[in-house]
Image (cartoon, rainbow, N blue to C red):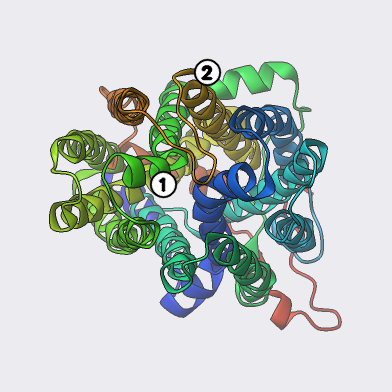
Amino acid sequence: MTSPAVSAANADPSISWPRLFAFALPGLGLGGLAVALSVYLPRYYASHIGLTLSAVGVAFMAVRLLDMCVDPVVGLLMDHTRTRIGRYRVWLLAGAPLLAIPVYMLFLAPAGVSLIYLIIWLFIYYLGTSVISLAHASWASVVASRYHDRSRVFGTIQVISTFAAAAVLIAPILIPNSTTATRDMGWSIIIAVPFGILMASFFTPERIVVEHSAERTTLRDYWEMVSWPEMRRIVAAAFCLTLGPGWMSAMYLFYFQDSRGFAFRTASALLLLYIFAGVLGAAGLSWLATRLGKHRTLMMASTGYSLGLILIALMPRGAIVPAAILMFALGFLAAGFQLLGRAMCADAGDAIRLAKGKHRQGLLYAMMTMVEKIASAFSIGLTFTILGAVGYQAKEGAHNTPAAIHNLELVYILGPIFFVMLGGACYLGYKLDHKRHAEIRALLEARDGQVGPAAALGGLGAGAAPAPSPAE
């Protein structure tokens, strides 16, 4: 590829920081939920509501596996959507009530609700998160089209999400009662979800990407996209890098209280440090990715994360300083797993659009979230089922034998190390670096020509409809 073409690919202006900050604000609700749902809610239903460990684990796993079938349909519908206010914005707005209502029903549930209650509201909750996360990630791939800009955009989203997760974790530290803390988490998320979505929708323009193929999407398209060389690696890594940390987070409170000897508030403070480190990690790793490349940065992060888990198992019981240092390091490194994978998915979407003439970014992110949901389902379903099988008791006030605690330690450490290392190994030999992507963007821009953006909601007045796509 000649240098003028590469220069054309680099001519795309970057999104301004104020607009980027507003665009990232939906991460407030999703970031808070990432911790509250995976760490505190399963424990809340097993200890306070009164459901068994195995029932809670099976409920989370079953709903995740059922919900994953919805993602490809939603992603495809998004890619085919064209409205006066854009393609993805309308879906983001629709997701606000679809998420806020089930959060209320789950986090403020009274003691004694049934397993069916949990399953129904979990399904609606996961549907809401699917709509919001798919719309936001797909829109992000349009907001930033250049290789390094995508690290910046997805890094900012991750910083906002991680900050929200850290803010949510203040409740367990200030409120020693875990039930009250869980309910307060729910209220904070209910407020954050619509606020973030409205901010992003009003202040961010949306460009309708040109398509050069009028063919309908068939089952063959699904296979071609998921079997695309880069997407195979991205999808496999997303599964592993979700399952490893998810496995750890599902058992975190059990492990740090019964094995490492920390009280509930201390364990929550360490988790807050882990999450807060992710704010710096998202910024630091997204910056590093602009120097080393996304895939190399992710491989380094996964290796360091696995080494940190080994050191946690070796540290003395109740040693707060080593625990704080290790949790900070782990949180810093884990921040790169999702943001770098999603940024690379956007790059792969450009390569597929160049080859196939179809913009299917929503479908690609649906595939990613689908495998992430499978991994999340297994992270709770498997760990809780295994813990019950090895004799560990989760009920408040239960006594666990030394053998049961030893089994808890083995389950906590071995699974995450294996899957995180496997996730990093998926990128050995990865080819879609910044040079190759610059060539792809140059060819796309030469073919697409100039496309008018859909205005932000705040700029839409009478007769201010966005310019239509040539494909329309």
Task: Name the foreground residue: 119 vs 155.
Answer: 119
Mark 2 vs mark 1: give the one in front.
1
Q: Residue at x 32, y 54 (%)?
A: 7
Residue 312 lies, with reference to residue 62, above or below; the image says below
Q: Residue at x 63, y 40 (%)?
A: 359
Disc on res. 253: 1
Specify whether 336 is left or right of 239: left
Residue 336 lies, with reference to residue 189, above or below; the image says above
The amino acid type found where label 2 is placed reads Ser
Q: Residue at x 50, y 39 (%)?
A: 350
Task: Name the foreground residue: 471 vs 341.
Answer: 341
Answer yes or no: is residue 438 visible: no
Q: Position of residue 74 (x, y in %)?
A: 75, 40
Q: Secondary structure at mark 2?
A: loop
| Image quadrant in which the N terminus is located | top left
Task: Name the foreground residue: 45 vs 464.
Answer: 45
Q: Position of residue 141 (x, y in %)?
A: 52, 51
Q: Position of residue 471 (x, y in %)?
A: 74, 46
Answer yes or no: is residue 49 visible: yes
Q: Secondary structure at mark 1?
A: helix
The amino acid type found where label 1 is placed reads Leu
Read off the residue under disc 2: 227
Q: Quadrant of residue 320?
A: bottom left
Q: Position of residue 339 (x, y in %)?
A: 41, 49
Q: Quadrant of residue 100?
A: bottom right
